[in-house]
């Protein structure tokens, strides 16, 4: 089967296909497979925004049919309070999706009990990919991601799956997952979508208090300034520049800054260590944790 690049469809009014059970979803997937139709998949945890919709639009261009999952996965939250605070409004999510989905496209919105009828015991070895940055500060997070994405892939059986580069480390983990599980799925990375002031779009942004929201664009602004200094400064010097600039606001507190190779995610101490280096950052803005990254 070939990806249908350049294939555009005009949406029309219809009753959206929303499945809450694995069996119903698989029945629909098999009907599409019998028609030799390709499926592009956009996994989400809801609280949709323009970043998610950009993935859906691309999936519609490149596939015959599109699947979107909406599932807040408890297994990837190492902090129970973070799980409890996570925004949930499936009604608003469905309204956002409706203009982009056609009659045979579908949404998979299962319950926790449907996805995890018994306790999950799968443990993945993602190696050093899961030990740095987010893995260091969020123990167990990436195993939870791997478990749920593997389940979703096997339910939806897509040809392609779309992930934003804002969660760049997660993207690397999912590519490794596809290799471990030997899944015939093409992982499509998609650029970070940003607000007009530069803040990376995130479901968490709506939780920001006004002062922290006004300060948050400084994250991308500072990363951009650092990227412009690579000729004259070392990774460590730029790391300290980013930390001091953001912490000086009194509203933002840097959790980590790392310059790392894009393929291995191993930290670099000099620009000569890799041809493709990206700066990764996590920042606490009041009660909200924000992440971002930029190729340098």
Image: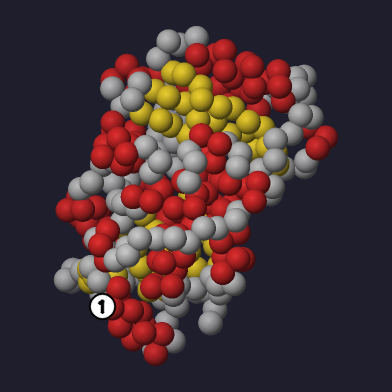
Image coordinates for residue 23, horizontal then vertical, percent: 28, 78
Q: Can you see residue 294? A: no
Residue under label 1: 24
Image coordinates for residue 215, horizontal then vertical, percent: 40, 19
Return the residue nearer the eye: 259 or 2.
259
Badge 1 element = helix
> Residue at horizontal 55%, vertical 72%?
183
When the figure is inspected, residue 232 is found, relative to residue 163, above or below; the finding is above
Q: Residue 222's quadrant in the figure?
A: top right
Q: Can you see residue 91? A: yes
Return the residue nearer the eye: 207 or 178.
178
- Seen in the image, is 185 located left or right of residue 42? right
Image coordinates for residue 69, horizontal then vertical, percent: 33, 61
Return the residue nearer the eye: 282 or 165.
282
> Residue at horizontal 28%, vertical 46%?
47
When the figure is inspected, residue 28 is found, relative to residue 235, above or below; the finding is below
Return the residue nearer the eye: 118 or 269.
118
Q: Residue 10's quadrant in the figure?
A: bottom left
- Seen in the image, is 140 located left or right of residue 212? right
Quarter in which the C terminus is drawn: top right
> Residue at horizontal 76%, vertical 29%?
269
When the figure is inspected, residue 222 is found, relative to residue 165, above or below; the finding is above
> Residue at horizontal 54%, vertical 31%?
281
Image coordinates for residue 282, horizontal then vertical, percent: 50, 30
User: Given the current orientation, which residue lies at the most extreme right position?
Assistant: 272
Q: Residue 293's quadrant in the figure?
A: top right
């Amino acid at each position: 089967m070939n990806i249908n690049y350049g294939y555009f469809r005009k949406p029309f009014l219809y009753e959206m296909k929303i499945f809450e059970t694995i069996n119903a979803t698989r029945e629909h997937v098999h009907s599409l497979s019998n028609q030799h139709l390709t499926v592009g998949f956009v996994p989400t945890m809801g609280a949709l925004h323009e970043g998610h919709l950009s993935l859906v639009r691309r999936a519609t261009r490149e596939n015959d049919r599109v699947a979107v999952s909406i599932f807040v996965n408890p297994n990837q939250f190492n902090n129970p309070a973070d799980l409890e605070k996570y925004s949930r409004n499936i009604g608003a999510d469905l309204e956002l999706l409706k203009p982009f989905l056609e009659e045979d496209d579908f949404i998979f919105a299962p319950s926790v009990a449907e996805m995890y009828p018994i306790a999950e015991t799968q443990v993945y070895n993602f190696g050093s990919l899961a030990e740095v940055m987010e893995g260091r500060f969020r123990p167990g997070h990436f195993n939870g991601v791997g478990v749920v994405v593997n389940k979703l892939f096997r339910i939806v059986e897509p040809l392609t799956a779309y992930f934003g580069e804002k969660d760049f480390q997660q993207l690397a983990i999912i590519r490794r997952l596809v290799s471990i599980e030997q899944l015939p799925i093409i992982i499509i990375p998609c650029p970070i979508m940003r607000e007009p002031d530069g803040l990376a779009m995130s479901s968490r942004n709506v939780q920001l208090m006004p002062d922290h929201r006004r300060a948050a664009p400084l994250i991308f602004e500072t990363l951009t300034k650092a990227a412009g200094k690579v000729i004259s400064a070392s990774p460590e010097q730029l790391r300290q520049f980013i930390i001091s600039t953001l912490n000086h606001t009194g509203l933002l507190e840097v959790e980590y800054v790392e310059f790392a190779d894009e393929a291995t995610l191993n930290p670099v101490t000099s620009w000569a260590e890799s041809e493709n280096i990206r700066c990764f950052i996590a920042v606490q803005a009041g009660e909200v944790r924000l992440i971002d990254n930029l190729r340098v």
